[in-house]
Image (cartoon, grey):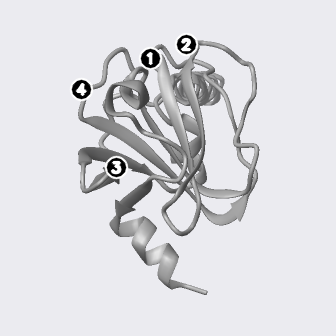
Amino acid sequence: MRLALPCAAVIRLVVGLAILSFMLSVPVRADEALETQSLRIEVAKGKHHDFTVEMAITPRQRERGLMHRREMAPDRGMLFAFGETRQVLMWMRNTYLPLDMLFIGRDGRIRSIHENAKPLSEAIIDSKVPVDFVLELNAGTVRQFGIRTGNRVRNALIEQAGQTP
């Protein structure tokens, strides 16, 4: 009888650890809500295009990005904020959506663009220049709206970064 109590406790502990291990191994739900903000890309001569973007600000949010998503509305995207100016390396691991990536400086200007990133690829996508932000949009958006390097991106977080020394 004395062995039953410790044995039951060990079984509960093992089962609890197994459940915890399983929960930690399951990817974060793709539909987990992130903060959203409006974002505007100013193209040529007063023309602009508006989007609603999810904000990837923390290391965990940036690491997850758009992984495991199967769809994204045409007027949506994700803005990655790095909190510093540096060369950025991205990839498409576990990302099912083809994406256009816009690499944006602290001043809100697009510094470089990578169009039509291949889903699920682990190839490195290099910003090629130091940037503070990366905007991911559905593939084809850059071509559709005539977005180019040098265009300005306006968003509350980008504006705030541009005002700090």
Badge 3 amino acid: Ala
Task: Specify few, some or many for label 1: CA neighbours under 10 Å numbering under 14, 14-19, or 20 or more.
Answer: many
Mark 4 crowd level (few <14, some 14–19, many ≥20, 10 Å Cα) = few
Structural distance between the alpha carbons of marks 3 and 4? 24 Å
The first of marks 3 and 2 along the sequence is 3
Q: Nearer the viewer, residue 83 or 4?
A: 83
Secondary structure type for disc 2: loop
Residue 5 visible in image: no
- The residue to which callout 1 is attached is 97
Label number found at residue 23? none
Of the residues shown, which amino acid type is indicated by label 2? Pro
Please name which of the two marks, 3 or 4, marks the residue nearer to the observer: 3
38 sits to left or right of 129 = left
The reply to whether discs 2 and 1 touch (Cβ–Cβ < 8 Å) is yes
What residue do we see at 76% from left, 51% from top?
87
User: Which residue carries the number 4 mark?
Assistant: 73
Kindly identify which numbered label has been placed on residue 44. Answer: 3
**Residue 119 numbered tag:** 2
Is residue 115 shown above or below 76? above
Q: Secondary structure at mark 1?
A: loop
Q: Whole-Å distance between the Cαs marked 1 and 3?
A: 28 Å
Q: Residues within 10 Å of mark 2 (few under 14, many from 20)?
A: some
Q: Earlier in the sequence, mark 2 or mark 1?
A: 1
The amino acid type found where label 4 is placed reads Ala
Task: Examine the rendering and report whether any part of residue 145 can be seen.
Answer: yes
